Amino acid sequence: MGTCREPEPSQIFVPGPIIVGAGPSGLAVAACLSNQGVPSVILERTDCLASLWQKRTYDRLKLHLPKHFCELPLMPFPKNFPKYPSKQQFISYVESYAARFNIKPVFNQTVEKAEFDDVSGLWNVKTQDVVYTSTWLVVATGENAEPVFPNIPGLKKFTGPIVHTSAYKSGLVFANRKVLVVGCGNSGMEVSLDLCRYNALPHMVVRNSVHVLPRDFLGLSTFGIAMTLLKWFPLKLVDNILLLLANSTLGNTDHLGLRRPKTGPIELKNVTGKTPVLDVGAISLIRSGQIRVTQAVKEITRNGAKFLNGQEIEFDSIILATGYKSNVPDWLKDNKFFTKEGMPKTPFPNGWKGEKGLYTVGFTRRGLSGTAYDAVKIAEDITDQWMKFNGPLSIRNICSSHIIHLHFNKS
Ligand SMILES: Cc1cc2nc3c(=O)[nH]c(=O)nc-3n(C[C@H](O)[C@H](O)[C@H](O)COP(=O)(O)OP(=O)(O)OC[C@H]3O[C@@H](n4cnc5c(N)ncnc54)[C@H](O)[C@@H]3O)c2cc1C
Ligand SMILES: NC(=O)C1=CN([C@@H]2O[C@H](COP(=O)(O)OP(=O)(O)OC[C@H]3O[C@@H](n4cnc5c(N)ncnc54)[C@H](OP(=O)(O)O)[C@@H]3O)[C@@H](O)[C@H]2O)C=CC1
Ligand SMILES: O=C(O)C(=O)Cc1c[nH]c2ccccc12
């Protein structure tokens, strides 16, 4: 009496797996499970599906692989979608996907901690207001969960706006501004291109080597060509063919400041995860001088940047196209399955299954086709266990969705 204690967060027992993240990966697992009659609960930190696509990408974004490489399991893209669907089209596809499989994530639930309890043999997954408990935990928080903010000397001194590409929508607000774009991956290239279309003056930092390939070659997608060739030829030969094809369409890019790595594009992707740039127009603007390529930054000053070659240029704004990272180490406790960078230690195609009911989907560095592969495997594996425990027609199975509702209505 009289003491004021924080109330214990309420606990909810989830009959099927707990899935963390309502992006394409989490939805794909839930859909494959639902297709087998297995229930699941998705916990999502934001208030929408596919939040990366809805909230953290720019207006002009399109898929850069042809749509059939980006399909989620069990539901193709609509026939009337173009080869490279727009961001809006992709979002509408994801929304119909969730509706089709009747997936209703619990929104505004940020997973702060997930821990396996050896005594009960169950996973406890804590959000800001509830502990969810289950036999299975599916990690679907993505390779792009958090923006990477680089440690560039002097960055804090800069007086103008500094925006990460995850917060960039369009070049509209940058018209006639000199903008330093740090990074030359797909984001850096496409944001620089977008800036030009709004009459801004982008300077793109290229501190290292980079592979740039045309998105298409003679009407065929370069990615599709690579996948077909890989069925017949060794990887090194395919890489050499891709480089020939890139040289014949883009020419030699060395004198533009874009040096190629010694390792070929697919081998580099497999070994380091670094995605080749698929060019959708930036190279021709670099050639015409509308996008300037700069050396590495030595330091940022109040109103610009000093470069390694001694050059100093004034800028109005800085855009950080410095990529993303996983956030798994922030919330998954005592885990030996993930590296300290939050990626599964076991490489593709075996990274989807950990121990004690732990699964991961969408950490293959193979985009949405990797997601589809993982999701099918995980759903098969959990369905097998579910059927052994419950049988297809058990009372627990039939009532499962009601159990969740009862718990929610209690508070
Ligand atoms: C700009 C851009 C363009 C891309 N284009 C393509 C493409 O054309 N083709 C392709 O195959 N891939 C592409 N990708 C790769 C991209 O990873 C996939 O498209 C896809 O979004 C991956 O889905 P996911 O569900 O694994 O991750 P995400 O889409 O990132 O979804 C993860 C979800 O988990 C939620 N979450 C994170 N942490 C927590 C937490 N602690 N608690 C609760 N919820 C949490 C997030 O809010 C998010 O909704 C692109 C990526 C980017 C950044
Ligand atoms: N249309 C589409 O479908 C698009 C797809 N994507 C995908 O999204 C994912 C993320 O792409 P992206 O956001 O480009 O991230 P990436 O990780 O691919 O690229 C990050 C870039 O930032 C550079 N960088 C990082 N830190 C620094 C620093 N301190 N100083 C200078 N440069 C730095 C890196 O250089 P270095 O190599 O030297 O480390 C690299 O060029 C990728 O898988 C990509 O393919 C992105 C945009 C569009
Ligand atoms: O943009 C990405 O990272 C993707 O997820 C797509 C992708 C997977 N493997 C690739 C190899 C070459 C170019 C793009 C991809």
Image (cartoon, rainbow, N blue to C red):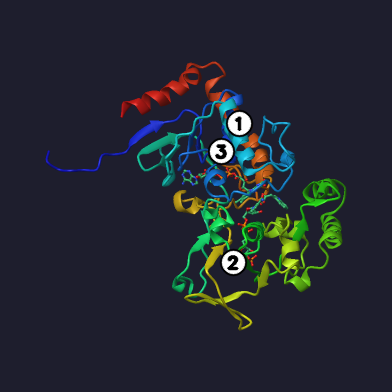
Q: In which quarter of the image is residue 50?
A: top right
In this rendering, position of residue 133 left or right of residue 210:
left
Ligand 1 within 8 angstroms of badge 1 C-beta = no
Nearer to us: label 1 or label 2: 2
Q: How crowded is mark 2: few (under 14 residues within 10 Å), some or many (20 or more)?
A: many
Q: What element carries label 3?
A: helix
Q: Earlier in the sequence, mark 3 or mark 1?
A: 3
Which amino acid type is shown beneath numbered disc 3? Gly
Which residue is depicted at the point 57% across and 54% down?
170
Ligand 1 within 8 angstroms of badge 3 C-beta = yes
Ligand 2 within 8 angstroms of badge 2 C-beta = yes
Q: What element carries label 1?
A: helix
Separation of residues labelled 3 and 1 (CA atoms):
12 Å
Q: Compared with residue 302, is residue 263 higher up or lower down, i.e. above or below?
A: above
Q: Quadrant of the N terminus?
A: top left
- Identify residue for label 2: 182
Q: Is mark 2 on a helix, strand or loop?
A: strand
Q: Which mark is residue 97?
A: 1
Which amino acid type is shown beneath numbered disc 1? Tyr
Most foreground residue, 370 or 338 = 370
Which amino acid type is shown beneath numbered disc 2? Val
